[in-house]
Image: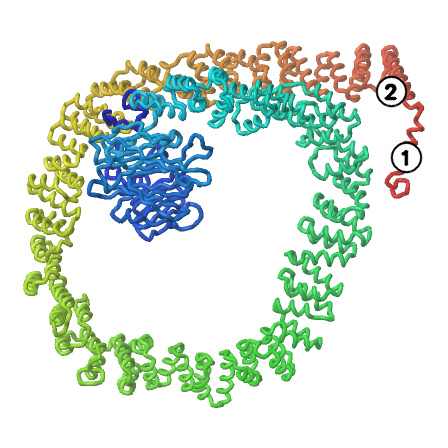
Amino acid sequence: LPPLPYTPLLYQKKSITMAANVPIVFNEALNLASLGVPETSIKHGLTTMSSDNWIVCVEPSQVTMVDLKNGGQITRRAITAEAAIMNPSQNIIALRSGTRVQIFNLDAKQKLKSYEMPEAVVFWKWASPSTLAMVTSTAVFHWSLAGSEDPAKVFDRHQSLGANSQIINYNVSPDNKWCLLGGISAGQGGINGNMQLYSIEKKVSQPLQGHAGAFAVIKIMGREDPAQVLVFHEKKNDLPQEPPKIFVMEIGRDPAKGAAFRLPPTQIPVPADAAADFPVSLMIDKKDEIAFLMTKMGYLYMFDIISGKTMYRAKITQDVVFCTATQDSTGAMYGITVRRGQVFRIQLNGQALVPYIVSTLRDNDLAIKVAGRLNLPGAENLYAAEFERLIGARDVVNAAKLVASSGTALRTPATIARFQQIPAEPGSPQPVFQYFSTLLESGRLNEQESIELAKPVLQQGRPQLLEKWLKDDKLQCSETLGDLIMPSDVGMALSVYLRAECHAKAINCFVQRGEYEKIVPYATSVGFKMDYSTMLSQLLFNNPQGALDLAKGLVNAEGGPLIDIQSTAEAFLSSNRVQETTAFLLEALKDNKEEHAYLQTKLLEINLIGGAPQVADAIMQNGILTHYDRPHVGKLCEKAGMWQRAAEHYTDINDIKRVFKNSHQMAPEFVVEYFGKLNRDQSISLLKDMLSRGPANVQVCVEIAKKYNDELGATDLVGVFEQNKATEGLYYYLGAIVNFSEDPVVHFKYIQASCQLGQFKEAERVCRDSNIYVPEDVKDYLMNAKLPDPRPLIHVCDRFDFVDELTDFLYLNSLLQYLEVYVTKVSPAKTPQVIGKLFDLGANEDFIKRILMAVGTACPVDELVEIAETRNRLRLLQPWLEARVATGSTEPGTHNALGKIYITLNKDPKAFLLNNMFYEPKVLGLFCESLDPSLAFLAYKKSSGECDDNLIKISFDHGLYRDLARYLVERQDLELWARVLNKEETEDGHEDPQKRQLIDQVVEWALPESTSADEVSCTVKAFMAADLPGELIVLLERIILQGSDFSDNKNLQNLLILTAIRADASRVAGYIDQLDNFDAKDIALICVSESHMLYEEAFTIYVKFAKPEFTESKEDQIEMQVSAIGVLVDYMKDLDRAKTFAAQVDKKPVWSKLGKAQLEEKCPADAIDSYIHAQDPSEYVAVCSEAREAEIWTELIPYLVMARKSLQENVLDTELIYAYAKTNNLTELEKFVNGPNVANIQGIGDRCFDEQLYNAAKTIYQSINNNSKLALCHIHLEEYREAVQAAGKANNVGTWKAVCFACLRAGEFRLASTCGLEVIKYPDHVDEVVAYYSDLGHFTHLVSLFEQGLGLEDAHIGIFTELGILYTKHVPGKVMEHCKVFFSKLNVSKVVRACERARLFSPAVYLHMQNKEFDNAVKIMMERATAFEHELFLDAIVKVRNAEIMYKAVQFYLSVHPTQFTRLMEVMEPHVDHSRVVNQLRRTGDWALQLGISYMQNVQGGDLSAVNEALNELFIDDEDYESLRKSIDRFKNFNMIALAQKLSTHELLEFRRISAYVYRCNKKWSQSIDLSKGDRMWKDCIDTANESADSEIIENLLRFFCDTSEKECFCAALYTCYAHISPDVALELGWINGYHNFVMPFFIQTFKHTHERLQKLEEKTTPKEGDNAEDEIAGSYGGLNGFNSGML
C-alpha cells in the first residue's frame, strides 16, 4: 500500500482512510508545531504522552500542556525543568531537573512530593495512575502517590541493559506482579533490542532479545478465567539474518488451574526496504484484543493476540514516531512524530476487517474467529457454508462451537431445528443438548434457545439446572419461560417474570408466596397500576397480618400513600384489631407530618385508654410523633399515672408543679433532664417549689443546680438554697461547680459554706487552688470568723501577698506556731517579709533566729539581707549565714553578705577575697571602694574580666598603674587593652598623663617580666590597635633585629613589616631584604592595597619568593610569577614591562594573565596573540565580545580555530560562522555549516539577518530548513515568488503575514491575496491585515480578499464580521443582505458598532433583534426616526430586559406617536407598573390622562390606587356620576376620605350622595348622616344608621325626626333599626311626641320576640330523664387522683 500523505490540518475531524477496505482508520488529531511548540522540544525525553488526556512538552523556559479532551486547549506554565510527564488519569504532573523529582497537583495547586534521586533518571513513566516508575543507569524504582514514602527500588537492571543501552519503554502487568523493561543499543548489524522480564513475587529476571513488548489480558475460549499474556517482539542480536517474530505467552498462571496459554512464535512479514527497521513501541487494544506494533521507519503492524497472526501492515508516516499511547475507551492508538509534531490516531476499522482478511489475507479461519469474537460483519456466508459442511459431516461438537462463535449469525430457530432433527448416536447425548451445552459454555442463550432448553429439562424433573443457569445469567427470561416453570417452582417463575418484566404475573407470584409486603414496592418501581382497596378488604378478614403488610406497603409507596390512612385505620379498628391498627398507624405516621396531628393523637389515645399505656410510652419514648395534641395526651398520661410523660406534655407552670408533687415517683435522671426544657423563670420557680416541700428533694435539686448552673445562674441558685436554708445542699451544689466556675461569688459562698459545715480542708483547698474569688472579701471573712484552724487564711494571705497582715494577725493572736509552720512548710520564700514584719513588731531575736534556723536554706538570701541591711540588723544573720556556708552553700548572696560582715569587722578580708570562689566581685568591690581601694582591686580582679571597667576606674583614681599593667599583660585581652590605650586626649591637646604612666609601666615592668610569647604578641597587637607605631617599631626592632628568643618568630616579623608599612614606608624595602621568615603572599597583598600602594615592594616580594631557594614547588613558583605580572598589569598598568616579563619567564599562565589584562585594556589584537601563546581558549566569550566590538574578524579566526581544537562550544562555532560571514567568506561558511558543528545555527542566522547579511542568512536558513526566515530573506532580496513558496513550506501565520504585507507594498496583489487568505484563517491576525490594507488605501482589494475568505473551508466568525464592517465603510448597499445571510456567523456587537458609525440604523436594529438585544433595538428606534417601525417596535418592547425602557417608550409614544399610544399600552399591559404609568401621564398633562382613559379602564381590574384615583378624577370632571359610583363599588383601593371631602361640596346632588356613600363605606357614620340630612335624603340617613349598629347614632336620628316632625321617617327608622333600638327609648319618644300609632308596630314586634326567647329558655332548663345516672358516672371520676381525699 502506498504511504499515507501528510496532511497538515489542525484538529482534523475527518478520518483519512488509507485505502479501500483497509482495516484501520487514520486521522491527525492535531499538530504540535502549529500550536507553537518549537521543533527542538518535539523529541524523545522532552515530549511525553501518558494517555489520551494530555501531551506535555518541555520548552527552554516553560512547560506546554495540550489538553486532548478539550479540543487541544493549550496551557503554558513558566516552569524550568528537564522533563515533565502528566498522570494518565488525574491533573498531576511530575517534573524532573537533575536528580530532583517533584510531583504537583495542578487542581489543588500544591506540591505532593519531592525527592532527590541518588543518581540521574534516564527514563520514567507512569506505571499506573498511582505509581511513577523511574529508571536509572543501574536500577528501577517505583514511587507511590499515596503516603509519604520515598521511591522504592524494585529491581536492578540486567547486564544486557547496561549503561550503553537507551531505555525506551517500561511496562507493569495488570496484576502488578511482572515488570518489563526495554532498551536499544548500537550493534554490529544495526540496532539491538534487549528486554528484561522481572517477577516481583519471585524476584528473578529473564532477559529477552527484542525491541518492544506489552502485557495484555485476554479471554480464552473454553476457559472461565482470563489469561494475562506477554506480547513481545523478538529479534536475535547474534542472528541478524533471521526474521523477527511475535511471541504471545501467558505469565503468572497457577499450574493447578491447568497449562498456561502459549502460541508458537509467528514470523513478522518485514518488507524488503525495512530490513534495518526496528520497533519503537507495542500497544495493546484492550477492547478488541489486538496489538499495534510501530517501527522507527513509520511501519504499522496489527496482530491478533488470540492467534498471533499478522492482520495488517502499512507505512503510515515518513517521520520517526517516538511517543505512543492508547485510548482504552475505543482501543485506538496515538502517536507523535519527531520535529514535525504530528499527533495521529489509529483505530481498528471493524466494518472492513473481516472483508480484508477474506479478500486480502485469504484466511477464512481467521476471519471466522475474529468475526465471532468481535461480533463483526462480513463472515455470514463463511459461517453458513462451514456450518453446512460440519452438519453434513455429523460433526456436532464443532458445529455447535461454530454457532457459538458466530455471534448472532447462526443462532436462529432454524439452527435449533437442525440439531433437533439429527438422530443421537448410541451412548452419546442428544445433539441438541450438545449444542445447548456449547452455547452455555460460551455465553448466554437467547429467548428461543432458553425456551427450547427448558422444555426437556422440566420434563426430566431437573429444575435445579434451570435455577443454576438463571443464577449464572445464562438464560434469557421471557413470559413463556416463566409459564413453563410456574407449575414446578413458583419462586423460580417469579425470578423469570421479574427479569422479563411480566408485572401482573409477578404480583400473582407474590400473593401465592404470601410476600404481601413486596407487592407495593414492586408495583411502584415498575409503574404497574392495580386495585389495592379490593385486595385489602379481602385480606382483612382472611389474613389480618397479610392485610397489615400490604397496608404498610401501600402507605409507604413512592409518590405518596396509595390508600386513605384514616379510613384504613378505622377499618382495622372496626374489626377490633387494636394491635394491627397501632402497627399500621406507626408505619403510616413515621414521616411525622403536621397534617396527621389528629391521627397521631388517636394512636396514642387508643393505647392509653385501651389498656396498653406501655405501647404509648414506647411511642413517645422513640419521639417519632410530634404533632399530636400534647395537652390532651398529657391529661391522659396523668390519669394513667404516667407522671413523667404528663410532665413532658405540659407547658403551663401550674400544671407542671401539680405533676411534680409526685416527683418522688419520678426517676431522678428524668427530673434533672426535664429542667432543660423549661425557661429560666419556670426552672427557678419549680426549684423553689420542690425545695419548699422538705429535705427529701434536696439531692435532686442539687443535681439540677449542678447541670443547669450556666443557664440558671449561680447567683439565683445560691439565693434559692439560702432562702430555704439548705446549707448542705448549697455546699454540695457549689462543690460540684467550684472547680470549673469563674464566678467569684461561687467560690466565696463555697468557702463560707465549707466553714459553716466544718469542712475546713475544703475551704483550705479552694483558698489554696482557686484564682477566682476576691481575696480581700475572703480574707476579711476568715479573719472575722476566727476559725480554730487558720490554714485557709494562711493560704489566702500567702497567695495574694497579705503577708504583713497575716504576720500581724498571727502574732497578735499568739498563733506563733502557725507563723513558724507558714515560713517552714507553706512559703519559705516569704520568710524575708515575715522577718521584716517581726523586726517592725519588735519580736524576740531568739524567736527570729529560731525561725531562720528552722527555715534554713529555703529562705531567699538576697531579699533577707536587703531587709536586714535597711534595718541595720545584718550582724544578726551571721550565725545563719555561716551555717549555710557550712552546709556547702554556693549562693553568691550568702557569700556576699558574709563577706560584708567580715570586711566590716576586718576579719582577714584579703584572705576572704582571694580564697573565696563564690562571692560576687562587683558587689563586694563596690562595698570595698569606700573602705579600702586595694581590697576593691582584688575583688574586681577576681571577676575574670566582668568588672574590668570598675577595675580600670579604681586603678586610675587611686594610681594603681603597675598593678593595672601587670593585669593587662596577663589578661591578653585586646578589647581591654583598647579601653585603656584609646583614651581621649586632654582639653589642651596633650596626651593623657594617666595613659602615658600606664604605657611606661608596661614597657618598663610588664614586658621585661614576661616570658610568654603570647603575652608579648598580644601586647604588641594592642599597641598596634592603639595606633602607637613609634613605640611599637622601637620595641620590635629591639626584639627581632638585636637578637632575642623571638628573632625568628614569623608573627613578629610580619608585625614589624606591617608596622613599618603603616608608620614608615621607607623602611619596608630594607626589611624585605633583611627578613626571610614572613608571610610573603599576605604581606604582598597588603602592600598593593589601596591604603598603601607599595607596588614595587610587592613586585620585589613576588620575584624574590619565586626563586627556587625560597619556593621549592614549581606550581608555587608559577603562582608567584603570575602574581608578579599581576602587580604590573593590575596595579602599575605597565603592559610593556609586563609583556617583557612574560617573554622572560615564558610560562603559559603568565601569558594568560597578560592576555586577560590586555583584553581588559581594550587591546584585543595583543590579547589574542597572548592567548595564542598561552594556548588558552578559556576566555573565548570575552575575546569574541572584544573582537566583535573592534571588528577584527580576520585576527579572530585563528584564535577560534585554536579554541575549537580543545573546546566544543556553541559560542565558538557560532562566532566562527559569523566571522566568515563578516569577512564575506561564503565558501568557508557553507562548508562549515554543512559540516559537524555545535553552533546555534538559528541564532547566527537571525544575527546575520538582523545585520542585513541576507545572502549569508539565506544560506544558513536553507541548511536548517527554516522556511519562515528564508521567506523573509527572499522578501528583502525582492524574490517574492520564492518568498511565497517558502511561506507555504513554513505554513506559519507570521510568515504568511510578512510575505503578504511585502507583496502588498510591492504591488503584487495576486500573491498578496494568496498569502492573505492563509493569514485571515487565524482570527487574531484579521485586524492587522485590515489595518495594513487600509493604511495603503487598497480598499477594493481588501473587500475582495475577505469575499474570497468566505469560501474557505475553515472560515471563522472573524472573516464574516470583518467583511460586514468593511461593507459598512465601503459598500453600504450590501450591509443588510450580508447581515441577513450570515447573521449566525457574525460578531453582532462589532458589526452593530460599525453600522452605528456609518449611520446605518436599520441594519443595526435588525442585528439587535436577531441577537435578542431588544433593549438596544428599542433605544435605536426611539432615538433614530429613520429606524422606527411600529409593529417591530411593539414586538421588541415586550421582550426588553430593562423595564425602564418601557417607561421611556411610554413617553416616546406620547410625544411622537400619541395616536398609537393605546395600542402600545395594550401590548405592554402585563409588563409595566400601572401606577408608575399613571403618574407619568399626570406629569405629562391632563390631555395625556384623557388619552390614557381606555388603557386605565382596561387595567383597573388590578385595583391600583393610582389608577382608581385618576379615573375617579376623570369621571368627576366629566360629571359622570354613574361611572364614578360603579368604580367606587367595584374598586376600593383609593383615598376614600379625600374623595368624600371633595364631593361633599359638589354642586350636583348625586355627587354629594356619593360622598355620603363613601363616608358610610368608611364607617364615618356621623359625617354620612349629616350630609344626607342636608340633602333631605332620609332613606340614606336611616340605612346608614342601621348599618352603623350604634344605638347612640340611631337614637339621635330618631330624636332628629321627632324634632323635625318627620313621623313617617320616625316609623321607618323604628322598623329598619329594630334590632339596635332599646324599647324604653322608643316608648319615651312615642309618648312624648304622641306618636302612639307610629310606635305601636315596634312594640308588637318586641313583645313577640321576648315571648319566643322565654319559651326557648324554659325548654332548655327543663331536666331530662337519665341526668341522675350521668351525675353518678361523673362522681365516680371525682375519686381519681385523690380528689375525694381533700388534697385538692
Query: Which SS class for mark 1?
Result: helix
Give residue 1676's mark.
1
Q: Are marks 1 and 2 in contact (CB under 8 Å)?
A: no
As drawn, which residue projects farthest toward the front?
Answer: 426
When the figure is inspected, residue 1024 is found, relative to residue 903, above or below; the finding is above
Q: Tell me: 1414 left or right of 1590.
A: left
Q: How many marks?
A: 2
* Quadrant of the frame with the C terminus: top right
- Specify few, some or many for label 1: CA neighbours under 10 Å numbering under 14, 14-19, or 20 or more: few
Image location (x, y in percent) of residue 1651: 90, 17
- Residue bearing the label numbered 2: 1624
When the figure is inspected, residue 1063 is found, relative to residue 1600, above or below; the finding is below
Give residue 517's mark.
none
The residue depicted at 71 percent of the width and 26 percent of the height is 546
Indicate the quadrant where residue 737 lies.
Answer: bottom right
Report whether residue 64 is seen: no
Indicate the quadrant where residue 1143 lies.
Answer: bottom left
Image location (x, y in percent) of residue 70: 37, 31
